[in-house]
Image (cartoon, grey):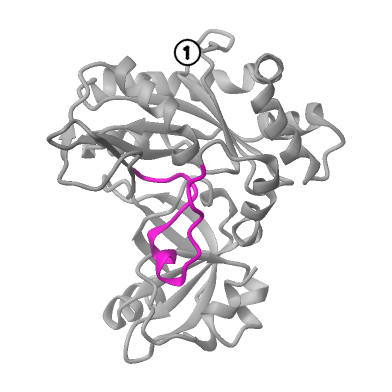
Amino acid sequence: MKLYSPTSNSSYKRFFYSTEAEFEKDVVAQADHIFGPDALYFDLKKRLKGKEIIGIPDGYLIDCSNADEPALFIVENEISTHDSFKHIGIQLLKFVVAFDDYKVELKANLIGHLQENPGMMKRFEAFCANSNSRNIDSYMEAAVFGDFKGLVIIDEAGPELNKILEKIRADISILTFNRFLDLEGKVIFAFDPFQEDEGEEAFGTSIAAIPNPQPEQLQAGQSRKARADTIIVPAREEGFQKVFLGQHKWHEIRISASMKPRIKFIAAYQSAPISAITHIAPVADISLYKDTGKYIVTFAEPAKEIGPIHLRESRSKPQGPIYVEREKLLSSRTLEEAMEK
């Protein structure tokens, strides 16, 4: 969870949204903070029209953090007072079913939106310039003509919504977003960031949220995570032996929506007294874990021993997922070395 305050720090209480329109207005206003400098949010309500199914998403997001593999997300902004099945679940299912029939029209709509918004076009052109694409048309095509990816932004994600997403079995992630107020009415926003993970904060690698990022700031953000194919998870001895080595899986992992499609390997950092990364395994599947909103990673084969790869600073230790390149990890003496750009 990330906190962002445009004013000051104080004692805050949660603001409860009464309408989806009010909630969505805040999401749009804070889009650069939520999604980071390497993504573009399209506040564009264009219907997804399949052969027999029609749905109208609240927006679209293009993640360009991996310059050569831009990824499109269909976005649904919701408040938790809406019925998880009748309102949210059915709407998401419509998007999944209609998506493949709509890609040509969607590409044209997104390019048209860029042409109407010069600031967004400038950013998109900067992303394209850092890629191998010939022009913005081919870059947009690379984003749109991939597999379906969905994103639900909601004030509170309950077990029922997680169960529905598990049944739909599509690539749909959840981000929570909330507004808080102090006694003077000053505002702070708390949200699950699209591109960051709390496990990396101890190592000083979190990307700062940048309001209205400029093109020259974009290339710096497309760094280690853009090349990462491995997730490192902290593990205590009992769970490591029983689950990671014994069951060839690891569960209840928080994985950011932008990183989930890129993960090909999983490595384990064993906590004290070992305090090192000791094993790695190829990933066969990443799926929702029960109704927790977190994920379970199933291995393609048993984990193999590596390293051990220790920490340069013993006072720091992973608190959650960390993303690195497998080849760089295997050739590094410390975790910090594997995380260098």
What residue is drawn where x is 49% and y is 86%? 312
The majority secondary structure of the magenta stretch comes to loop
Where's residue 30, x and y in %? 42, 33
Instruction: Determine whether 87 is above or below 164 in the image.
Output: above
What residue is drawn where x is 32% and y is 92%? 273
Location of residue 300 (image quadrant): bottom right
Where's residue 159, x and y in %? 22, 39
Location of residue 81 (image quadrant): top left
What residue is drawn where x is 62% and y is 62%? 224
Instruction: Left or right? Give the position of 323 relative to 200.
Output: right
- Graded by Cα atoms within 10 Å as few (under 14), some (14 to 19) or many (20 or more), the crowding at tag 1 reads many
Where's residue 123, x and y in %? 68, 34
In depth, the one of 251 and 112 nearer the eye is: 112
Instruction: Left or right? Give the position of 95 relative to 329.
Output: left
**Residues rendered magenta in the picture:** 191-210
Instruction: Determine whether 252 is above or below 278 in the image.
Output: above
Q: Amino acid at mark 1?
A: Gly
According to the picture, the residue beneath numbered tag 1 turns out to be 55
